[in-house]
């Protein structure tokens, strides 16, 4: 069983570290798409992931197209405030990928335009532009895990 989180050009090391910790706790695979806004030996990144880095299945990619090509048989869902579909309205399955953009700009218009049927968003008030990246990733993947009955996890 493997779900996947893809971070396209993440900028803030603490967010990536928090997401890596979520991946370690859930068995979800992490994909980082360059360029990264930090060095992978950044102290903030390491501190946010604590001592769980050994438990993270992580892959680095030079482009999002590389991820899509390598995993062309899988489904991809794209988190964006520009989506009209609620993340909880989908039926997720083993092998799904959840794609998140950089903290300051989100996913590129090219990525969003290429996948209009798989754009997902979380309901929120109009008081903020978006949720924190690591919170968003945790909310979405835990919904997918709930739907799959938390495979391989203590319940």
Image: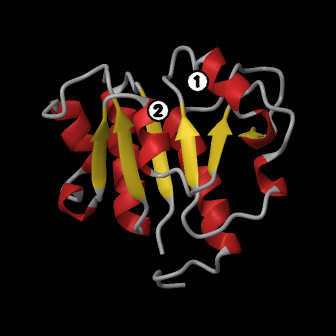
Asked if residue 22 lies left or right of residue 62, the reply is right
Location of residue 87 with respect to 45 vertically, above or below: below
The reply to whether discs 2 and 1 touch (Cβ–Cβ < 8 Å) is: no
Asked if residue 45 lies left or right of residue 104, the reply is left
* Category of crowding for the residue at label 2, using alpha-carbon neighbours closer than 10 angstroms: few (below 14), some (14–19), many (at least 20): few
Give the number of marks.
2
- Front one among 13 and 10: 10
Q: What label does residue 9 carry, if any?
A: none
Q: Quadrant of residue 112?
A: top right
Q: Quadrant of residue 27?
A: bottom left
Give the residue displayed 53% in from the left and 81% down from the top. Answer: 151
Could you tell me residue 11's position as x and y percent? 38, 21
Could you tell me residue 98's position as x and y percent? 57, 47
Asked if residue 63 lies left or right of residue 109, the reply is left
State which mark lies toward you, 2 or 1.
Answer: 2
Give the residue displayed 56% in from the left and 15% down from the top. Answer: 105
Q: Quadrant of the C terminus?
A: bottom right
Q: What is the basis of the colouring in this image?
A: secondary structure
Location of residue 51 with respect to 2 vertically, above or below: above
Could you tell me residue 65's position as x and y percent? 47, 32
* Category of crowding for the residue at label 1, using alpha-carbon neighbours closer than 10 angstroms: few (below 14), some (14–19), many (at least 20): many
Q: Quadrant of residue 90?
A: bottom right
Q: Which residue is tagged 1?
A: 107
Between the C-alphas of marks 2 and 1, the distance is 13 Å
Q: Which residue is tagged 2?
A: 65
For label 2, the SS is helix
Give the residue displayed 79% in from the left and 55% down from the top. Answer: 88
Give the residue displayed 41% in from the left and 48% down from the top. Answer: 70
Could you tell me residue 46's position as x and y percent? 20, 41
User: Which label's residue is closer to the chain start, 2 or 1?
Assistant: 2
For label 1, the SS is loop
């Amino acid at each position: 069983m493997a779900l996947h989180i893809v971070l396209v050009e993440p900028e803030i090391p603490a967010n990536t570290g928090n997401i890596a910790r979520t991946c370690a706790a859930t068995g979800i695979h992490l994909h980082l798409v360059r360029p990264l806004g930090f060095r992978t030996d950044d102290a903030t990144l390491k501190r946010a992931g604590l001592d769980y880095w050994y438990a993270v299945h992580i892959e680095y990619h030079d482009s999002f197209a590389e991820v899509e090509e390598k995993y062309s048989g899988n489904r991809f869902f794209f988190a964006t405030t520009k989506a009209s579909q609620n993340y909880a309205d989908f039926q997720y399955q083993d092998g799904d990928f959840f794609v998140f953009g950089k903290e300051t700009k989100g996913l590129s218009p090219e990525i969003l335009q290429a996948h209009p049927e798989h754009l997902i968003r979380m309901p929120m008030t109009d008081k903020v532009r978006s949720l924190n990246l690591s919170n968003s990733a945790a909310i979405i993947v835990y919904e997918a895990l709930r739907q799959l009955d938390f495979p391989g996890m203590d319940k």
